[in-house]
């Protein structure tokens, strides 16, 4: 074994039990093993940053952050589950074939616009960011982002027209990213 492997093996053997107990006192069940594994994965990746004279407190700090990430993930999962469950109670549509066709048309058209346009549209439509927030993500000004968004929407609408023409009769309405998919 190499120097890094020996160092990591020693770190693991000395502190695995302590990290396991630390995590066990904070979570229950099968998650313990996953969290401990993630802690030591971080330790392996950042082995040069591990202070060998005080490795255990460093590992506890990593464990605390991993546990926080796990908790955020569980919370997001619960929130998503609640949102999905709430949407099931929406009005029932007798025949959803038109909606399926429209969604397929949108997906095909979306895949045909340039990748930069797809990212701009995703930030606004999927991530629900404001123009100012999305501009920060892309590292550009608000005005630049607004122009990119305008152009991306135009290209998507043009693609939607082409997809609908190829697929046969046009759908009853063409969704507009600017009005949230409402008719009009």
Image: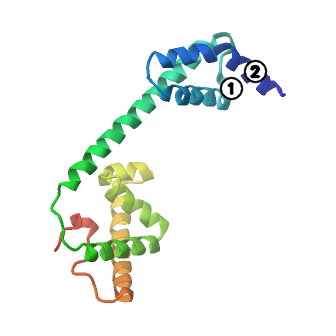
Residue 18 placement, left or right of 48: left
Q: How many marks?
A: 2
Give 66 or 88, whichever is nearer the viewer.
Answer: 88
SS for dot 1: helix
Q: Position of residue 126 (x, y in %)?
A: 34, 56
126 lies above or below 75: below
Q: Position of residue 36 (x, y in %)?
A: 56, 25
Q: Position of residue 133 (x, y in %)?
A: 34, 48
Give 140 or 51, whichever is nearer the viewer.
Answer: 51
Residue 47 - label: 1
User: Who's the residue at 66% across and 32% down the image?
Assistant: 45
73 lies above or below 91: above
Of labels 1 and 2, the one closer to you? 2
177 lies above or below 101: above
User: Callout 2: few (<14), some (14-19), or many (20+) C-alpha neighbours within 10 Å?
Assistant: some
Q: Quadrant of residue 131?
A: bottom left
Give 30 or 25, whichever is nearer the viewer.
Answer: 30
Residue 32 placement, left or right of 182: right
SS for dot 2: helix
Q: Quadrant of residue 144?
A: bottom left
Residue 72 visible in the displayed image: yes
Residue 71 - label: none
Reading the chain from its start, which is encountered first: label 1 or label 2? 2
User: Who's the residue at 68% across and 13% down the image?
Assistant: 14
Q: Quadrant of the N terminus?
A: top right
Q: Position of residue 8 (x, y in %)?
A: 72, 23
Q: Quadrant of the C terminus?
A: bottom left
Q: Residue furthest top?
A: 53
User: Who's the residue at 68% across and 20% down the image?
Assistant: 12
Question: Marks 1 and 2, how far apart in space?
Answer: 8 Å
The residue that mark 2 highlights is 7
């Amino acid at each position: 074994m190499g120097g890094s492997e020996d160092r990591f093996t020693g770190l693991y053997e000395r502190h695995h039990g302590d990290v396991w107990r630390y995590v066990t006192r904070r979570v229950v069940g099968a998650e313990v093993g996953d969290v401990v594994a993630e802690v030591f994965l971080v330790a392996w990746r950042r082995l040069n940053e591990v202070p060998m004279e005080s490795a255990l407190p460093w590992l506890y700090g990593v464990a605390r952050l991993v546990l926080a990430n796990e908790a955020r993930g569980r919370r997001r999962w619960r929130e998503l589950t609640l949102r999905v469950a709430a949407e099931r109670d929406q009005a029932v549509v007798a025949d959803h074939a038109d909606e399926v066709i429209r969604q397929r048309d949108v997906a095909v058209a979306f895949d045909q616009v340039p990748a930069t346009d797809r990212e701009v549209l995703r930030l606004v439509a999927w991530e629900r960011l404001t123009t100012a927030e999305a501009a920060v993500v892309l590292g550009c000004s608000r005005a630049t982002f607004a122009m990119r968004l305008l152009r991306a929407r135009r290209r998507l609408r043009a693609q939607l027209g082409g997809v609908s023409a190829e697929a046969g009769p046009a759908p009853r309405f063409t969704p507009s990213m600017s009005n949230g998919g409402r008719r009009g």
